[in-house]
Amino acid sequence: MNASAGINLDQAFVVRPIDITTIWSILTQSVGQVTANAQCRDNMEREFQSAEQLNAYDNASSRAIRVLSIRARSKDREITASLNFGSSYSDRIRVSLDGPEDALIIIRDRLYALFADMKPWYGLICRIDFFYVIWPLLVFMSIMVLAMSDSPRPSRALSFGEALKATGIATIFFVGVGGAIWGLNRLRRRFFPEVVFAIGRGAERYDFDENIRWVVIIGFVLSVLASLLVSFVAPPA
């Protein structure tokens, strides 16, 4: 009995040469002839006829792979498979399978296991939008400050100059907060990407970013947390 199956995963992933080889092996054994198509940064589409050919692609930054599609079809066209990595914002990995139900179950289960291994360790970090982190924190801190302060006594109305100055300060503050959110989100997208093709020179870029993530970013965060912990635990002078 023929059937159709799909896999739609909204997850970050890192495609390494071993993943390409494994996918090619799964599809070759279970389906048939396999080909791949890569949409690259230089607006070129490149075709690959084997896993070795794809893994040998230099993947230089100027023509780095942005979207990778892998397709397979049996000689009798009874089974077809289509895998897409990186083309959709909501579903980073999309798979479409058609053919006999028993064969599809085997292919689908093997691909699910592979995709789980392709998740980067920072998968949760790369989904953070700092707008939803900083603004609630500011609101919470404002409420805490108001709750801890004495009840204010009635004060005189501000003059035009004072009101203008207060408005300017508030504007600068909110612009600064907005800039900080933009900068943090940009930093997250740069060093915690959801889509990574770590083949060719892409592997070197991934290893470099991995060092930045652990040594610089995570190291800085841990040092800040350690300082805060010491300040809370250390007895007053």
Image (cartoon, rainbow, N blue to C red):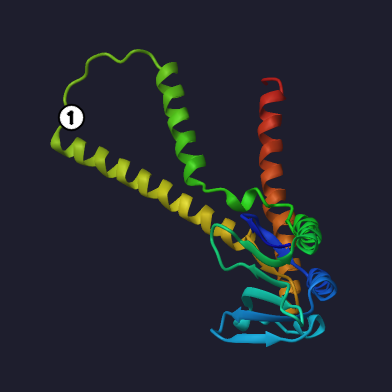
Classed neighbour count for the residue bearing mark 1: other residues with Cα under 10 Å, few (<14), some (14–19), many (≥20): few
Q: Which is more toward the observer, 237 or 67? A: 67
In the rendered picture of this protein, how many numbered marks are placed on residues?
Answer: 1
Quadrant assignment for the N terminus? bottom right
Residue 122 x %, y %: 69, 52
Residue 115 x %, y %: 75, 59
From the viewer's perspective, is residue 24 above or below residue 163? below
From the viewer's perspective, is residue 205 above or below residue 212? below
From the viewer's perspective, is residue 66 above or below residue 164? below
At a point 66% along the width and 41% down the height, the residue shown is 224
Q: In the displayed structure, does residue 14 sit left or right of residue 45?
A: right
Residue that protrudes farthest toward the left in the picture: 160
State the image quarter where residue 226 is shown: top right
Check disc 1 and give the amino acid type.
Leu
Q: Which is more toward the observer, 237 or 210? A: 210
Residue 75 x %, y %: 77, 82
Residue 83 x %, y %: 67, 69
State the image quarter where residue 157 is shown: top left
At a point 36% along the width and 49% down the height, the residue shown is 175
Residue matched to label 1: 158
Q: Which is more toward the observer, 231 or 181? A: 181
At a point 73% along the width and 71% down the height, the residue shown is 198
Q: In the displayed structure, does residue 111 sit left or right of residue 41?
A: right
From the viewer's perspective, is residue 170 above or below residue 109? above
